[in-house]
């Protein structure tokens, strides 16, 4: 039997293709390794960010590919189809970070009742969350549509949760207005949901005319402003920017408009992928990348064992029930369905109200 991998050119994300490799049989797996069939995964604009930052943040090293190509990481579900680990049975279901592929070999380590991690040498040196797999068989929150929402939004909502906590930890840098670019993105409206619950914070969504109605329908932005209208925003009080778009020209316009009133400028995503590596200095706070693993490590120390999971679980419990009214889930199976959703997402052709669950298995 063969495995199928979806690969993309690192220097031109438009170039993509499929390759086949021979699957190892159970007896040839390394000791304590697992062969996992990747049966479904979510695909969002966040996965395009993984690809755009693949070299800088080491995402490409998670799943080896031919030279000059990479495999985009995705969040989803897999089934153990062969096991050489005494504590992991065939038929186990895992949730975690998988390749856009039909199969993955995991070198299982730190196996517990709740999960395990992949100890493969090439996967070390990246944030630990990308190597962790939850054992989810029989867990209702990972079944059916609940599971789809977990794959689509739980990793993005974790990022939103950490940004919200970071802003609160820093007293919003003296501002009471938070601007979110690419307000229709799933990370942005997750963050807006959390910020909206903080009664003293005004949440302003920046978006395109095409997505404005969707952003207004979410009900978590106090104000929705089109990109063409940002110079109409009041500048008489401090503001904080959380930039999901990654558009250098847009960020420059905002900084020049707000000047010294721009008290924080956090770079989170690259939904627009229109950035310059050599950006000039801008008025106001210096734009800085927000790195989620740093925040989660700080909070793990401050909140103690289980503290992050407990607080995040409470936040997710308030967010998850809002999702059926906000998103339409669409399933796609087979290589051509995967290629189409990948390219449509890369080129900005996916409506924000859609969420895609995919599989390379026919």
Image (cartoon, rainbow, N blue to C red):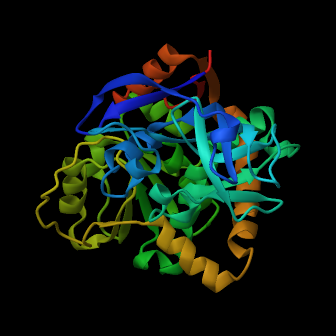
Residue pictured at 73% horizontal, 53% vertical: 134
Q: Do we see residue 311 in this rendering?
A: yes
Image spot of residue 349 (x, y percent): 40, 23
Which residue is at 80% across, 59% downward?
Answer: 114
Residue 331 lies, with reference to residue 7, above or below; the image says above
Quadrant for the C terminus in the image: top right
* Residue depicted at x 31% and y 40%: 272
Q: Nearer the viewer, residue 74 or 38?
A: 38
Quarter of the N terminus within the rendering:
top right
- Residue 175 place in picture, x, y as percent: 42, 73
| 314 relative to 1, above or below | below
Establish if 62 lies above or below 25: below
* Frontmost residue, 49 versus 17: 17
Q: Nearer the viewer, residue 359 or 300?
A: 359
* Percent coordinates x, y for residue 16 in the rendering: 34, 25
Image location (x, y in percent) of residue 196: 59, 58
Residue at the farthest right position: 138
Rendering quarter of residue 288: bottom left
Is residue 262 placed above or below 75 in the rendered structure?
below
297 and 198: which is toward the camera: 297
């Amino acid at each position: 039997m063969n495995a199928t991998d979806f690969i993309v050119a690192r220097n031109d994300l438009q170039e993509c293709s499929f390759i086949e490799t021979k699957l190892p049989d159970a007896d040839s797996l390394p000791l304590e390794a697992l062969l996992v069939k990747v049966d479904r995964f979510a695909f969002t604009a966040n996965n395009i960010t993984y690809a755009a930052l693949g070299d800088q943040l080491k995402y490409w090293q998670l799943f080896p590919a031919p030279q000059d190509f990479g495999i985009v990481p995705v969040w989803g579900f897999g089934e153990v189809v062969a096991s050489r680990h005494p504590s992991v049975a065939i038929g186990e279901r895992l949730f975690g970070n998988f390749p856009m592929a039909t199969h993955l070999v995991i070198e299982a380590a730190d196996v517990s009742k709740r999960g395990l991690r992949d100890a493969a040498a090439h996967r070390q040196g990246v944030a630990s969350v990308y190597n962790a797999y939850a054992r989810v068989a029989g867990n209702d929150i990972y079944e059916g549509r609940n599971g789809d929402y977990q794959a689509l939004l739980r990793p993005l909502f974790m990022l939103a949760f950490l940004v919200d906590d970071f802003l609160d930890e820093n007293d919003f840098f003296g501002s009471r207005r938070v601007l979110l670019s690419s307000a229709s993105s799933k990370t942005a409206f997750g963050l807006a949901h959390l910020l909206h619950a903080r009664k003293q914070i005004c949440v302003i969504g920046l978006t395109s005319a095409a997505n404005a109605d969707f952003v207004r329908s979410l009900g978590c932005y106090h104000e929705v402003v089109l990109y063409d209208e940002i110079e109409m925003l009041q500048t008489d009080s401090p503001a904080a920017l959380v930039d999901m778009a990654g558009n250098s020209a847009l960020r420059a316009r905002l900084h020049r408009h707000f000047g010294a009133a721009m008290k924080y400028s956090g770079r989170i995503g690259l939904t627009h992928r229109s950035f310059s590596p050599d950006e000039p200095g801008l008025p106001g706070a210096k734009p800085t990348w927000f790195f989620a693993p740093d925040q989660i490590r700080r909070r793990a120390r401050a909140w103690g064992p289980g503290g992050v999971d407990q607080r995040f679980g409470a936040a997710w419990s308030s967010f998850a029930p809002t999702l059926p009214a906000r998103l339409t889930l669409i399933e796609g199976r087979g290589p051509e369905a995967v290629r189409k959703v990948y390219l449509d997402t890369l080129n900005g052709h996916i409506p924000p109200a859609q969420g895609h669950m995919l599989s390379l298995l026919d």
